[in-house]
Image (cartoon, rainbow, N blue to C red):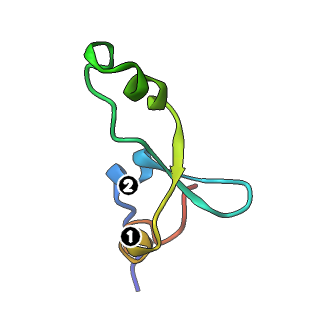
Amino acid sequence: MPKMKTHKGAKARFKISAGGKIMQQQGVRGNKYNRPKRSRRKYGKDILLSETNLGHLEKALPYGLK
């Protein structure tokens, strides 16, 4: 049986922490300089992925993030 393909967009957007939790970046990415200060502080920070989206990500990343 052939190998499953990794979704490259998901590979770039998610990280697995040392404890095995899946982290995602905040949505404040484009044009960060013309945003409120509170939104700019969130830029670059990672948050924990919700349980709702976990099933979709298991299909997109069948072998984890390698």
Determine whether the residue tagged by mark 2 lies in a helix, strand or loop.
helix
Rendered residue at 33%/30% (across/down): 29
Q: Residue furthest right?
A: 19
Towards the viewer: 32 or 7: 32
Determine whether the residue tagged by mark 1 lies in a helix, strand or loop.
helix
13 displayed left or right of 32: right
Mark 1 or 2 closer to N-term? 2
Towards the viewer: 37 or 23: 37
Q: CA distance from mark 1 to mark 2?
A: 12 Å
Rendered residue at 43%/52% (across/down): 11
Q: Residue furthest top?
A: 33
Image quadrant holding the N terminus, namely bottom left
Disc on res. 53: 1
29 displayed left or right of 43: left
Q: Residue furthest bottom?
A: 1
Kindly report which numbered mark, 1 or 2, lies closer to the viewer in this rendering: 1
Towards the viewer: 34 or 6: 34
Rendered residue at 39%/74% (across/down): 52
Seen in the picture, residue 27 relative to 44 is either above or below; the reply is: below
Count of numbered circles on the image: 2
Do the residues under discs 1 and 2 have CB atoms within 8 angstroms? no
- The x, y position of residue 65, in whole percent, is 54, 57
Image quadrant holding the C terminus, namely bottom right
Badge 1 crowding class, 10 Å Cα cut-off, few under 14, some 14 to 19, many 20 or more, is few
Towards the viewer: 34 or 1: 34
In the figure, residue 55 lies in which quadrant?
bottom left
Badge 2 crowding class, 10 Å Cα cut-off, few under 14, some 14 to 19, many 20 or more, is some
Dot 2 corresponds to which residue?
Answer: 10
- The x, y position of residue 35, in whole percent, is 29, 20
48 displayed left or right of 34: right
- Looking at the rendered structure, the kind of residue marked 1 is Asn
- Looking at the rendered structure, the kind of residue marked 2 is Ala
